[in-house]
Amino acid sequence: MSQSHQRASLPGCPSCEEPLEPGDRFCGACGYDLSAVPAPPGDRPTVAITVPAQSPGTPAAAPVEWPPASETDSTDRPAPTHRPADLPGVDSGGRPLSTADRTAVRFDEPDAPRAAAPAAPAAPDGASGDFELAAPDPRTAEHATAGAPAAGVKVCVACRSGHVDTDGYCENCGHAQPRERDHMEQELGGVAAVSDRGLRHHRNEDAFAVSCTALPDGSPAVVAIVCDGVSSASRPDEASAAAASAANESLLESLPRGAHPQQAMHEAILAASEAVNALAQEPRQALEHDQHRQENAPACTLVGAVMAGGLLVVGWVGDSRVYWVPEDRSNPPARLTEDDSWAAQMVAAGLMSEAEAYADERAHAITGWLGADAYELEPHTASFKPDRPGLVVVCTDGLWNYAEAAAEMAAAVPADACERPLHGAQVLVGHALDGGGHDNVTVALLPFAVAARGAGSA
């Protein structure tokens, strides 16, 4: 194709669409070089669709014979519509479809059975299909039929379906399970206790033990022991549990033998100290190789109360406390223990007022505790003979930090705590949690009843 023929065939300028004259080499309007216009293709872009010619001797394809439609009835209703499964067919290999493959499902009949889905092909030996979940999918677990878990198997408290592994996590959703000691409650005839992890600590390092026994004359004796693990020491949770258990067992052994409650409390603190010392990882002889090996030995504080024979005996080492709250709130409450702490020493020495000492950042540094690295064990005991009914509050600093003064503690104690000690302990723990819950919280309540004059044992 020549250039002159190309230019003569252009209807207008490709740039400004100005009409062109045959033989123009440039556009008269915009000066566009018409020689730069590419030549049109030599063939047509349209592809003709033709039926391929049949080779000689090939029979012609038979026309499709559609099955005749059903005739209309007397009401002139149209013939029913055929569904795909109503017609015979073949698969991709040209074989007739089986009857099961052509089973029709009539959606206009809701009670008709649905065709079963074809089973998935079996995996070859030694191979598996999709990965199986370790536990049911939590998105569908709530719709599954709830069944009793197998013996010894813990079920997740979050998804209610997964199993809990030995590390305390759900194998299905990964949720960390609450530990048994995160929240504990116990109530006996004359005492109740509640312990909670709090809102800031990752575990509960407090422990308690409550029990009831009888003196040789048959009168009851009620025991409450509360221990607070020292967080800066190793295994503080084990230390508090060992101390509470050992002190409680010692009291249950000595009180029925007729030991004086105050002497029994002293011996119980010594027994608790021995139990905590036994938790030290290495004997003290190893100190000659490492002078600082015992600096992080397990340690805890202890406070306890015993009500027996009309007496109230308290014992302690550390900064956990005992408060007395009279049943008649018109009478003043009192704190029955003195802290083994830096603040208490400053107040006792007259160097600071109580308000100044407890406002100092060193206030809660304890000077006495149970543990292999304690400077010197000095169990404190005191005996009281209340002349009126009241409530004995035995608690760790996780509670009294939010009700330090005796009047503040009495205000936090519910009015019916003597009749409902467990409820009262729950309320006090809630008071600490509402205040911030910065520490573990443990409290035991012992209602103290005074026998009427002329009644009771001597």
Image: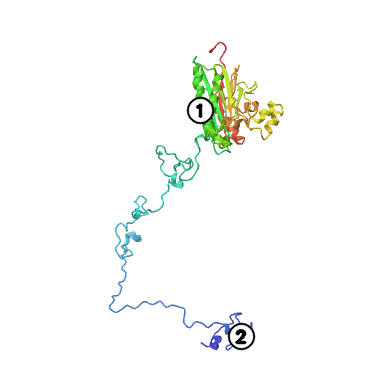
Q: Which mark is residue 271?
A: none
First in residue order: circle 2 vs circle 1: 2
Circle 1: element type: helix
Question: Can you see residue 433?
Answer: yes
Q: Residue furthest top?
A: 454
The percent coordinates of residue 29 (x first, y second) are 64, 83
The percent coordinates of residue 218 (x first, y second) are 49, 15
In the rendered image, which quarter contains the C terminus?
Answer: top right
The percent coordinates of residue 98 (x first, y second) are 29, 59
Q: From what the image shows, is residue 77 above or below residue 145?
A: below
Report the residue marked by disc 2.
26
Circle 2: element type: loop
Q: From what the image shows, is residue 331 above or below residue 342?
A: above
Tell which of 388 and 343 is nearer to you.
343
Quarter occupied by residue 265: top right
Tell which of 442 and 68 is nearer to you.
442
Q: From what the image shows, is residue 165 above or below residue 426?
A: below
How crowded is the residue under tag 1: few (<14 C-alpha within 10 Å), some, or many (20+)?
many
109 left or right, relative to 452: left
The percent coordinates of residue 314 (x first, y second) are 58, 22
| Amino acid beneath label 1 | Ser
Q: From what the image shows, is residue 159 above or below residue 263?
A: below
How crowded is the residue under tag 2: few (<14 C-alpha within 10 Å), some, or many (20+)?
some
| Amino acid beneath label 2 | Phe
The color scheme shown is rainbow
Distance from the alpha carbon under mark 2 to that under mark 1 = 110 Å
Question: Can you see residue 414?
Answer: no
Q: Residue furthest front?
A: 288
Tell which of 249 and 99 is nearer to you.
249
Report the residue marked by disc 1.
245
Q: Nearer the viewer, mark 2 or mark 1?
A: 1
